Amino acid sequence: MKKRLFFAVFSFFVFAVQAQDKEVKVGDVLTINSISESTYNHIDLPRKNIIIKRGGVPNYKSVYNNEVVVTEINTNADGEQLAVLKRKDGRKFFTSFPTIKANVTKAIDSEELIF
């Protein structure tokens, strides 16, 4: 009986620790993963025409494997974390956008962002 109780309590703590690992805080460094699809669903990258109007280079492959720092976190009504991301090296995205926004909860689940 004690073994079963110990196993149940141990399992609870293991699942609790795994749930806390997905919490993103300001200052965390994430990596934008290269995906097989042509567009990111949970990272808000600007459209091609907007990039051109602002004088940038619309090369979406330049975003792959960039390390980004979380500068701001907000939580919406559904409990999902929305973040503002800035490149770790200080450069701008597409040479004209200093930050981008992302739904971090969904982006990590779909492996668009990696811890």
Image: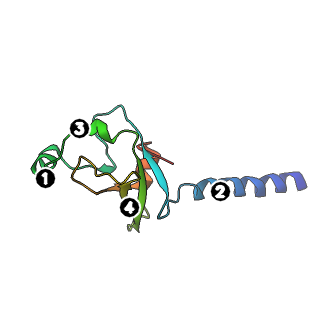
Report whether residue 1 is seen. no
- Disc 2 or 4, which lies upstream in sequence? 2
Gap between marks 3 and 1 measured at Cα: 14 Å
Query: Pointer 2: what residue?
Result: 17
- Disc 3 or 1, which lies upstream in sequence? 1
Which marked residue is nearer to the observer: mark 3 or mark 4? 3
Which marked residue is nearer to the observer: mark 2 or mark 1? 1
Q: Which mark is residue 54?
A: 1
Gap between marks 4 and 1 measured at Cα: 24 Å
Type of the residue with mark 4 = Leu
Query: Pointer 4: what residue?
Result: 82
- Disc 3 or 4, which lies upstream in sequence? 3
Residue at left offset 23%, top offset 38%: 59
Quarter holding residue 72: bottom left
- Disc 2 or 3, which lies upstream in sequence? 2
Pick the residue in front: 14 or 3: 14
Residue at left offset 83%, top offset 55%: 6
Query: Pointer 3: what residue?
Result: 59
Type of the residue with mark 1 = Arg
Q: Is residue 95 left or right of residue 41?
A: left
Answer whether labels 2 and 1 touch (C-beta < 8 Å): no
